[in-house]
Image: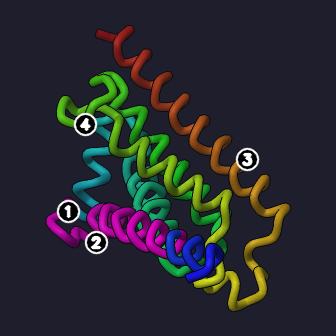
Amino acid sequence: MSCMNRRDLALLALRAGTGAVLMAHGTQKLFGWFGGAGLAGTAAAMEHMGFRPGRQSAIAAGLGEAGGGALLVLGLATPAAGAAAAGAMAGAVSVHAPAGFFNQGGGFEYPAFLGFTAAAVGLAGAGRLSVDHATRHRFDQPWMVGLAFAASALGAAAVVAKRAQGQEQEQEEE
């Protein structure tokens, strides 16, 4: 097996595994699949965590995870897919950060790992075993990498900052 084939197989495995996990989490939020709370339950949870408005936050998180994950599995629009998933995970990291790093204590280890993995695939590209390759990279142009990651970073930063500001205001009112 040539080195290029191994690389393409590795990217496929990484995309498929990471994308499937993200899709499962996103569909829990959006549709209540796999024991999830569905949109109404996720919206209430988002409100409780300080993401307002809760319904729009639930939709954005669910689409970032399910949509970004599905695109990663396919290897389609890989920069946008990786950036969307990474942005969604940045919001999750902000929720778990007060509990520290490790997952067993409720920390941010798991969402950070998913976010970094999705970002790495978005930056590296999907490889030859992908829809991007089959479409001659129509949805995976070099300029898309910077645009997708800049938009995701700005969006995630705005959402996390808005949440932090809302939490500060709630503490002042108490």
Q: Looking at the picture, how far across and down is residue 26, in whole percent?
A: 36, 64
Of the numbered discs 4 and 1, the one sitting upstream in the chain is 1
Of the numbered discs 4 and 2, the one sitting upstream in the chain is 2
Residue 158 vertical placement versus 36 (above, below): above
Q: Nearer the viewer, residue 18 or 163?
A: 18
Q: Are marks 2 and 1 in contact (CB under 8 Å)?
A: yes
Label 3 sits on a secondary structure element that is helix
Q: Nearer the viewer, residue 6 or 82?
A: 6
- Reading the image, the residue beneath label 3 is 150
- Reading the image, the residue beneath label 4 is 103
Q: CA distance from mark 2 to mark 1?
A: 8 Å
Q: Are marks 4 and 1 in contact (CB under 8 Å)?
A: no
The question of residue 7 being in magenta is answered with: no
Type of colouring:
rainbow
Q: Are marks 4 and 3 in contact (CB under 8 Å)?
A: no
Q: Is residue 90 left or right of residue 144?
A: left
> Which region is colored magenta?
11-37
- Reading the image, the residue beneath label 2 is 31
Q: Which mark is residue 36?
A: 1
Depth check, mark 1 against mark 3: the one in front is 3
Q: Is residue 97 left or right of residue 158?
A: left
Q: Quadrant of the N terminus?
A: bottom right
Residue beneath the point at 39% across and 63% down: 22
